[in-house]
């Protein structure tokens, strides 16, 4: 063997160490780091697809909720019987489509014949023509109708369908009275077209670009997952596609999502070369630095993401990493968590907020009434329910128009809401021009002062009412029911009966000439002064 000088041996050893370390680092990056990073990116893509499904589902819930409010309403129920034109004039004006964000409203009777239908683009105000309700021509569309009932309940369906104006969300309710009873008189159907506005809203929720992909250009629709399926991403891609089907499982549209992280980094980049060159002289230091800066952070990031995925915890991931790709993944996951949390808060607020008056709606009121009921039963603390009705509001709309009526309803709601000074006091829109106020326990004398304060508030605001026989301004009639803790029987308190008692007091106030109030006690129906 040829002898070597010390310098030659040193150079060969250094070269061998460099090759070994470089091979080890490249092998580690290829076999360990990149697969873990790929899984993290895949989990991020799955989260984005889950948020997409969550956002679509909530859009459908909002459409369904709007449909329910109109379908389960005694006025709608009566309209199906007497075809009252006033109902259409009051409730189905152009502004209704715009404020509710829907593009079609249709009433179908129990013989599946159209009673009334109208299509209107809620953005442009242009008329739209739909024919999906012609069930003789399109018998497959019968699948969109829920099975009607004559018992108490509100059968409902919601889904997607293809129309001559493009894909749309439909929501169908059996028409019932406000207490969910009555004979079967048909169905209330609303249509919301899903176009650019739909994908723009989805893009806001998901923080990624969402667009439509033409059905004809999609090679194999059968391989596409449904939008409602649990996302599973095995390979990192720039785009993912999900399929939307109608009630008969026929394709309606394909949504294309661009992922926030859709590409894996290169195997060896400039930073890796510098890293290898510097640390090739100190093998032990290289080993320690790799362990501290790569192995442990990757394991922790993957573990934290897995824990978030399994436990659905919205905690903040650390962004203190040396590797840029890990920082990018961590930041994107944190942004997604923030988006989910904010979206949940926004949706939770929308569920209990009346879109017109921006105060609590009937759904939120029920929750608050349940809380008051629980406090009354458990803590023996009474409460007060006040039902308010705007006097001669139909005359107001007839004289000044529905848009002015909506503006005035908003102002009245804000004025009533300001009367709720305590954190537990609630002002909610009960329906139409009716409002309900919930007050904590107070004396009858203090309640009378509160009611007089509300009447004075209406005088101060002085909303002109040219068609009111009562006064020159908008007035309120109010009925209050005082609920005492002694009204609790067998640890129970009938909320519906309390509402009916307040409603009865309201009608007594109207009988006394309106612009006044009547106070009674739930247990004795003892009337207070007006």
Image (cartoon, rainbow, N blue to C red):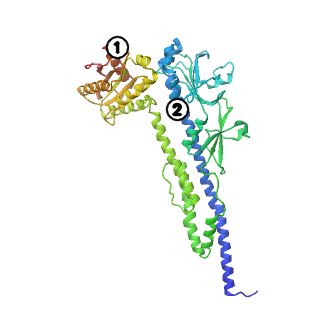
Is 194 located above or below residue 508 in the figure? Answer: below
Taking the view exactly as shown, the residue that stands out farthest to the left is 445
Q: Taking 42 as reference, is 379 left or right? A: left
Quarter containing the N terminus: bottom right
Image spot of residue 187 (x, y percent): 57, 20
Image spot of residue 4 (x, y percent): 71, 86
Say which quarter of the image contains residue 373: top left
In terms of depth relative to the viewer, which is nearer, 436 or 214?
Answer: 214
Quarter containing the C terminus: top left
In terms of depth relative to the viewer, which is nearer, 366 or 196?
Answer: 196
Residue found at x 34% / y 14% = 469
**Callout 2 secondary element:** helix
In terms of depth relative to the viewer, which is nearer, 435 or 499?
Answer: 435
Is 28 located above or below residue 43 in the figure? Answer: below
Say which quarter of the image contains residue 35: bottom right
Residue corresponding to mark 1: 469
Counting residues from the start of the chain, the first of labels 1 and 2 encountered is 2
**Mark 1 crowdedness (10 Å alpha carbons): few <14, some 14-19, many ≥20:** few
**Numbered circle sitting on residue 62:** 2
Image spot of residue 42 (x, y percent): 62, 51
Q: Disc 1, disc 2: CB below 8 Å? A: no
Residue found at x 49% / y 38% = 347
Q: CA–CA distance between discs 1 and 2?
A: 39 Å
**Callout 1 secondary element:** loop
Is 491 located above or below residue 501 in the figure? Answer: below
Image spot of residue 486 (x, y percent): 29, 27
């Amino acid at each position: 063997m040829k002898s070597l000088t010390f310098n030659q041996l040193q150079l060969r050893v250094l070269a061998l160490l460099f090759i070994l370390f470089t091979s080890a680092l490249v092998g580690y990056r290829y076999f360990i780091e990149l697969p873990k990073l790929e899984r993290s990116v895949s989990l991020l893509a799955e989260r984005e697809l889950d948020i997409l499904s969550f956002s679509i589902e909530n859009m459908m819930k909002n459409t369904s909720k709007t449909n329910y409010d109109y379908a389960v309403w005694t006025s709608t129920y009566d309209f199906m019987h007497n075809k009252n034109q006033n109902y259409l004039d009051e409730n189905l004006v152009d502004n209704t489509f715009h404020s509710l964000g829907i593009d079609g409203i249709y009433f179908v009777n129990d013989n599946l014949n159209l009673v009334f239908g109208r299509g209107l683009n809620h953005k442009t105000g242009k008329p739209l023509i739909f024919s999906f309700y012609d069930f003789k021509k399109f018998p497959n569309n019968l699948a969109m109708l829920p099975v009607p009932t004559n018992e108490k309940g509100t059968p409902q369906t919601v889904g997607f369908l293809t129309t001559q104006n493009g894909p749309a969300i439909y929501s169908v309710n059996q028409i019932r009275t406000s207490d969910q009873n009555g004979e079967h008189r048909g169905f209330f159907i609303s249509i919301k077209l899903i176009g650019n506005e739909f994908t723009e809203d989805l893009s806001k929720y998901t923080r990624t670009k969402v667009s439509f992909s033409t059905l004809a250009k999609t090679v194999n629709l059968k391989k596409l997952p449904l939008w409602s399926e649990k996302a599973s991403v095995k390979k990192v891609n720039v785009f993912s596609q999900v399929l939307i089907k109608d009630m008969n499982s026929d394709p309606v549209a394909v949504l294309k999502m661009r992922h926030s992280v859709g590409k894996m980094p290169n195997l060896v980049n400039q930073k890796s070369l510098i890293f290898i060159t510097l640390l090739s002289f100190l093998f032990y230091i290289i080993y320690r630095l790799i362990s501290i800066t790569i192995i442990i952070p990757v394991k922790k990031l993957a573990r934290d993401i897995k824990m978030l995925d399994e436990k659905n915890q919205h905690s903040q991931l650390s962004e203190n990493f040396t590797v840029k790709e890990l920082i990018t993944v961590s930041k994107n996951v944190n942004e997604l968590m923030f988006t989910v949390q904010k979206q949940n808060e926004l949706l939770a607020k929308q569920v209990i907020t009346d879109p017109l008056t921006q105060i609590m709606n009937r759904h939120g009121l029920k929750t608050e009434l349940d809380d008051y009921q629980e406090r009354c039963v458990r803590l023996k603390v009474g409460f007060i329910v006040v039902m308010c009705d705007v006097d001669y509001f139909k005359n107001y709309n007839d004289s000044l128009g529905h848009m002015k009526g909506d503006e005035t309803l908003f102002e009245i709601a804000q004025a009533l809401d300001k009367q709720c000074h305590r954190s537990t006091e609630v002002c909610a829109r009960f329906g139409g021009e009716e409002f309900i106020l919930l007050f904590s326990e107070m004396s009858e004398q203090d309640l009378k002062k509160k009611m007089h304060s509300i009447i004075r508030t209406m005088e101060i605001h002085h909303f002109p009412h040219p068609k009111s026989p009562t006064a020159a301004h908008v007035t309120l009639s109010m009925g209050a029911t005082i609920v005492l803790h002694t009204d609790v029987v067998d640890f129970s308190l009938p909320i519906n009966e309390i509402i009916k008692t307040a409603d009865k007091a309201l009608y007594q106030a109207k009988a006394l000439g309106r612009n006044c109030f009547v106070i009674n006690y739930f247990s004795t129906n003892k009337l207070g002064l007006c």
